[in-house]
Image: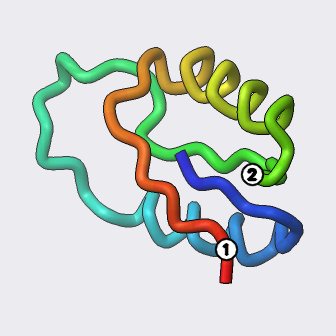
Amino acid sequence: MINYANNTDRANSLLSELHDIPTTTTPILRGKRFHAIKADVGVKASVQAMVKETIEEMERLDVVVSNAGW
C-alpha cells in the first residue's frame, strides 16, 4: 500500500512502475500487490480509514513504515 497526501499523478506513476516489476511469489498469493490510498497521516480518523481500506484491498497488513513529516 502506498499512502500519498495530495499528488495523485505521482502516486499513480509509482503504482505503474511497481506493477511492471515481475512477481517472485507463488500463485498462492491472492489479492493485489500494490494499492494507493490518499490519506492525511496527521489526522487520526484518516489513518484509521487508511488501515481499514488497506486490509479490505490487500487482505492483510503485515508491516507499517511511517516516513511522514519533514
The three-letter amino acid code for the residue at tag 1 is Gly
CA distance separating discs 1 and 2: 9 Å
Residue 50 drawn at (x, y percent): 71, 33
Identify whether 22 is placed above or below 63.
below
* Residue for point 61% across, 15% down: 56
The three-letter amino acid code for the residue at tag 2 is Val
Identify whether 16 is placed above or below 59.
below
Quadrant for the C terminus in the image = bottom right
* Left or right of 31 on screen, residue 53: right
Evaluate if marks 1 and 2 touch, with contact meaning CB atoms under 8 Å apart.
no
Identify whether 9 is placed above or below 27.
below
Looking at this rendering, what residue extends furthest in the bottom direction?
70
Identify the residue position indicated by label 1 in the image: 69
Label 1 Cα crowd, 10 Å radius (few <14 / some 14-19 / many 20+): few
* Residue for point 25% across, 23% down: 29
Residue 3 drawn at (x, y percent): 65, 54
Q: Which mark is residue 41?
A: 2
Camera-side residue of 32 and 70:
70
Residue 57 drawn at (x, y percent): 59, 23
Camera-side residue of 6 and 15:
6
Sequence-first tag of 1 and 2: 2
Identify whether 15 is placed above or below 69.
above
Camera-side residue of 36 and 50:
50
* Residue for point 67% across, 19% down: 52
